Image (cartoon, rainbow, N blue to C red):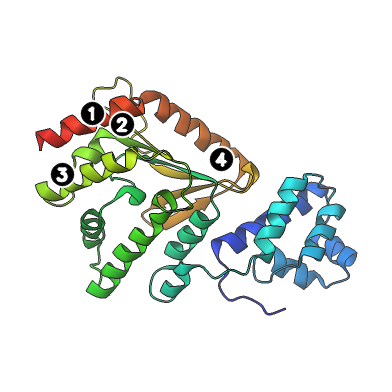
Amino acid sequence: MTTRREPTARQLRLAVELRRLREASGLSGRQAAALLGVSPVQVSHIESGLSGVSEERLRRLASHYACTDGEFIDALVAMATDRTRGWWEEYRGLLPTSFLDLSELDRHARFRCDVAVLYVPGLLQTETYARAVFSSRVPELAKEELELRVQHRRRRQAIIEGASAIPYQAVIHEAALRFRVGDRAASQEQLARILALSELDNVSVRVIPFDLDNFTRAGSSMTYVGGAVSKLDTVVRDTPLGTVFIDSEAQLDASRTIFHKMEAASFDPARSRDFIHRLAKEL
C-alpha cells in the first residue's frame, strides 16, 4: 500500500484510535503485526496515518483488541474506507491544510457547537466580515490567497444552510457582537446575517452579556464537533501557532463541561435575538 506523505486530520484520527485500542488491549505493535501477518513497520505506518487499512484488517484488529463496541468499529471502518474527494480538495496546495481538514471535519459532523468571545464564528460571518478578519493577518496575505480564504469560508457555511444542514449552536459573547470588524455598515450587515440564520430550525444563537457577574471564561473560544459516535467527537481551537484538533477523552469531557457552563451563562435564543435586534439599532 502506498505510503502517504501528508495524512489528513481525519486519517490521523483513525490512526490514533487504532493505536488507543491496541494500547488498551495490552498488545505491542509487534504482537499486533504478528496477529495480522504483517511487519511491525506496517502497523507503525497504520498507527501514524502514513498507510491506510482495509475493512477486513481493521475488523480483525478490533477483534484481537477485544473491542466490542459495534457502532464505534463501524464508524472506524467508514473512516478507513471513505474515498470521497470533497469540494475542499480544489484548495489543496492553495490554502493551509488546516482549512481542508476543517472542511472534512464539517462534512462528517453530526452537529457543531461554537463558543466565541472576540470574533463572530466563521460559519456565521458575512463575506465582508471574513475579508476584514483575514486582512488583519500579520504578515499580510497576498490578495489571491485572501480571496481564496473568504471563498472557502463561505462554502463551508453550507453545512448550516444547505440541503444537508446539521444542527448548529453558537454561544457568542457580547464583545464579539460589538467589536467593529470593518465599518458601521459591515457590522450592521453582520448582525442582520446572524439574526437571519438564527431563525433557521437547525440553528440556535445565544448571547452572553457584558453585565454578567463572575465571568471568568474569556479565553474559552472553541468549536465542538460531533463525530459519527461520541468517541469520535473533536474540539477545534485556534492558537497563535495554528489550528489544533483535540480528541482525548479527558479533554473532550472538559470541553463539554466548558460549553455547558457558557451555555448556562447565556440568554436563551429568543432573548438573544431581541438583544441582537437592540444592538443593531444602536449602531
CB under 8 Å between discs 4 and 2:
no
- Distance CA(mark 3)–CA(mark 1): 14 Å
Whole-angstrom CA distance, mark 3 to mark 4, is: 35 Å
Near mark 3 (Cα within 10 A), the count class, few <14, some 14-19 or many ≥20, is some
**Can you identify the residue that label 1 sits on?**
275
For label 2, the crowd category at 10 Å Cα-Cα, with few meaning under 14, some 14 to 19 and many 20 or more, is many
Whichever of labels 3 and 4 marks the residue nearer the N terminus, that label is 3
Local crowd at mark 4 within 10 Å, few (<14), some, or many (≥20)? some
User: Which residue bears the numbered disc 4?
Assistant: 252
Point out the tag, 2 or 1, that comes first from the N-terminus: 2
Alpha carbons under labels 3 and 2: distance apart: 17 Å
Q: What is the x, y in percent for residue 31?
A: 86, 61
Q: What residue did someone put label 3 on? A: 188
Whole-percent x, y for residue 153 in the image: 35, 59
Question: Type of residue at label 1?
Answer: Phe
Residue topped by disc 2: 207
Q: Quadrant of residue 262?
A: top left
Which residue is farthest top?
213
Residue 273's place in the image compared with 91, above or below, is above
What residue sits 33% from the left and 21% below the top? 214
